[in-house]
Image (tube, rainbow, N blue to C red):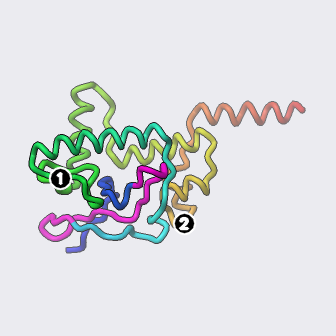
Amino acid sequence: MVPVNRSCWLLNGRILILIHLTININKTLTRGLNNKIIVQPTKTVNGRRMIDMDYDSIKLLKQWKMYQAQFMLKLGFNTNSPDQLVFSNTRNNFYLINVPNERMRNVQKRNGLKRITVHGLRHTHCSILFSMGASIKDVQARLGHTDIQTTMNIYAHVTKEEKKDTADKFAKFMEN
């Protein structure tokens, strides 16, 4: 059986650099034989990348690590290791790959929210970047795509508002 590749949503201390406002993505999780979780390098060289983060997001991650340290200590785990997972189960190990989507689905049902998967958040992130005016090359690098065509084919969704804005810009250009 060939392992199924999944995007890595689990980060450990070596992957996450909280001091420099960046996240270093260099691994992914795969489900192997008998659902065994395998940690391996990303699929492509471009998949290994540094992502710039804003101060508030890094601050939230630091707060999470402090909460996690207190919680896990009550369970008998010392989380002051550089290899400590940022998101771990109560055995201080990786969550099963399907857990994040199950938890999101539960929150969505309880709150009457539209269903979106963890991977769907990646698409949303990309769409927002494009809406903000990020260049295709910047989005490609942030998502770790080797081929820019992948970014274009999968993620270049233009919103109705952007289409209208484009039409308005064209009309104004033609008037001049």
Query: How far separated are the C-alphas under marks 2 and 1?
Result: 42 Å
Q: Nearer the viewer, residue 25 or 134?
A: 25
* Residue where numbered disc 2 is placed: 147
| Residue 5, placed above or below residue 61 | below
Q: Residues within 10 Å of mark 1 (few under 14, many from 20)?
A: some
| Residue 145, placed above or below residue 170 | below
Kind of residue indicated by mark 1: Asn
* Residue where numbered disc 1 is placed: 78
Q: Nearer the viewer, mark 2 or mark 1?
A: 1
Residue 113: give its label: none
Task: Give how far across and how far down residue 94 sits, in percent.
Answer: 20, 56
Please tell me how many numbered marks the rendered image carries.
Answer: 2
Q: Which residues are magenta?
A: 17-37
The answer to whether 176 appears left or right of 43 in the picture is right
The answer to whether 108 appears left or right of 132 in the picture is left
Task: Give how far across and how far down residue 121 sits, in percent.
Answer: 39, 43
Task: Identify the residue shown where x is 45% and y is 37%.
Answer: 56
Task: Identify the residue shown where x is 38% and y is 67%.
Answer: 42
Helix, strand or loop at mark 1:
loop
